[in-house]
Image (cartoon, rainbow, N blue to C red):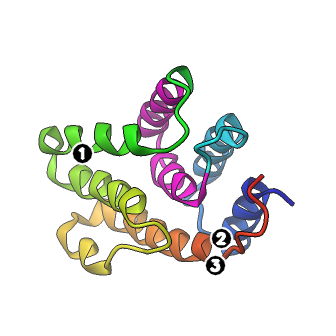
Amino acid sequence: MSLAEKVVYALRTRHLFLSSMHYEHFNMLIDRVKDEPFFCKELCKCAFLAAWDQAHAITFDQTMTELCNMKATNLQPMLEKGEALLPHLPHSEKALFQMSCDFLKYPGQTPDESVLLTLTSAWVSIADNALEASRVIDEIPDDDKN
């Protein structure tokens, strides 16, 4: 089983998707980049967070297009783009983008749950599920990169 398949299976088994649309967006995003050299667990974490709504899924997909076009082999350009956007985002959205940046900066780690205290109630379930998804993804063995 490939890493992409393992991630989808693990997240689905744990019932972490917020809706069928979240699941569909995630599958679309992962399917698009699962064979790219920059595909990794951290990218899966970011995709899970971005997939919760169409607007963020589109932004993520555009970033993936940029990475593919530049023939990126790692996620450094994605991290740089995310960090550049941070100052211009509304508070709760900024916290979620910061979470994505933290996924990329600190591989194999899950950000502290204190981020939940900074969010308005509408955003808490999204962030909470993303934190749990991060832990679940980190539990997947690294034996198969594809």
Q: Nearer the viewer, residue 4 or 38?
A: 38
Frontmost of labels 2 and 3 is 3
Is residue 37 in the magenta section? no
Q: Which residue in the protein does label 3 denote?
A: 139
Query: In which quadrant of the rendered image does the N terminus lie?
Result: bottom right
> Which label number is shown at residue 24?
none
Q: Which residue is mark 1?
A: 83
Residue drawn at (30%, 41%) of the image:
80
What residue does disc 2 label? 15
Q: How many circles with numbers are drawn on the protein?
A: 3
Up the image or down, 8 lies above or below 133; here it is above
- Determine whether, in the image, residue 123 is placed left or right of residue 8: left
Q: What secondary structure is found at the residue carrying circle 3?
A: helix
Query: What percent of the width, then of the height, locates residue 120?
Result: 21, 63
Look at the numbered disc 2 and give the secondary structure of its residue. loop
| Residue 45 on the magenta span | yes
Q: In the image, what residue occupies the spot 37% across and 55% down?
A: 100
Q: Residues within 10 Å of mark 3 (few under 14, many from 20)?
A: few
Q: Earlier in the sequence, mark 1 or mark 2?
A: 2
* Numbered disc in front, either 1 or 2: 1
Q: Residue at x 52, y 33 (%)?
A: 72
Please, what secondary structure does the residue beneath circle 1 have?
helix
Label 2 neighbourhood size at 10 Å, few (<14), some (14-19), many (20+)?
A: few
Q: Residue at x 53, y 77 (%)?
A: 135
